Image (cartoon, helix red, strand yellow):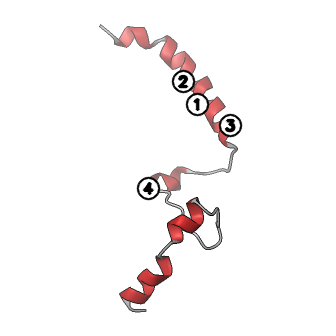
C-alpha cells in the first residue's frame, strides 16, 4: 500500500479513540510502557494500589534528605 493511502487510513484515528470512545476503529496511544501491562484493572484500583505502596516509602523518605 502506498504511504499516502496508509496515512489516509489513520487520519482521525486518535480523535475516534479518545474523543469518540471508538475502540474498534480508533488508535489509542500507549507508548513503550504498554509492554509492561499484564492485567486489566479499574483506574480506582490502580490509584489505590499506588497510594498504598507509596505511603511506607514516603514515611521513610526523611532519611534521604539532608
Which residue is label 4 attached to? Answer: 32
Sequence-earlier tag: 3 or 2: 3
Horizontal and vertical percent for residue 34? 51, 55
Sequence order check, earlier mark of 4 and 2:
4
Q: Which residue is mark 1?
A: 50
Q: Residue at x 62, y 63 (%)?
A: 20
Task: Judge from the rendering whether residue 45 lies leftward or rightward of residue 14; answer left or right.
Answer: right
Q: Is residue 7 above or below residue 17?
A: below
- For image coordinates 54% across by 62% down, the residue present is 28
For mark 2, what is the residue?
54
Circle 1/circle 2 CB separation < 8 Å:
yes
Foreground disc of the pair 3, 1: 3
The location of residue 51, given as percent across then percent down, is: 59, 26
Label 4 and label 1: CA atoms lie apart by: 20 Å
Secondary structure type for disc 1: helix
On screen, residue 7 versus residue 37, left or right, reads left
Mark 4 residue crowding within 10 angstroms, few (<14) / some (14–19) / many (20+) = few
Q: CA distance from mark 3 to mark 2?
A: 15 Å
Read off the residue under disc 3. Answer: 44
* Nearest to N terminus: mark 4 or mark 1: 4
Q: What's the CA distance linking mark 4 and mark 2? A: 23 Å
Residue 44 appears at what percent x and percent y? Answer: 68, 37
The reply to whether discs 4 and 3 touch (Cβ–Cβ < 8 Å) is no
- Residue beneath the point at 68% across and 50% down: 40
The residues bearing labels 4 and 3 have C-alpha atoms spaced at a distance of 23 Å
Amino acid at each position: 500500500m502506498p504511504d499516502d493511502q496508509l496515512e489516509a487510513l489513520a487520519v482521525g484515528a486518535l480523535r475516534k479513540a479518545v474523543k469518540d470512545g471508538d475502540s474498534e476503529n480508533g488508535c489509542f496511544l500507549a507508548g513503550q510502557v504498554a509492554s509492561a501491562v499484564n492485567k486489566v484493572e479499574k483506574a480506582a484500583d490502580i490509584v489505590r494500589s499506588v497510594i498504598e505502596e507509596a505511603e511506607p516509602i514516603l514515611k521513610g523518605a526523611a532519611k534521604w534528605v539532608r
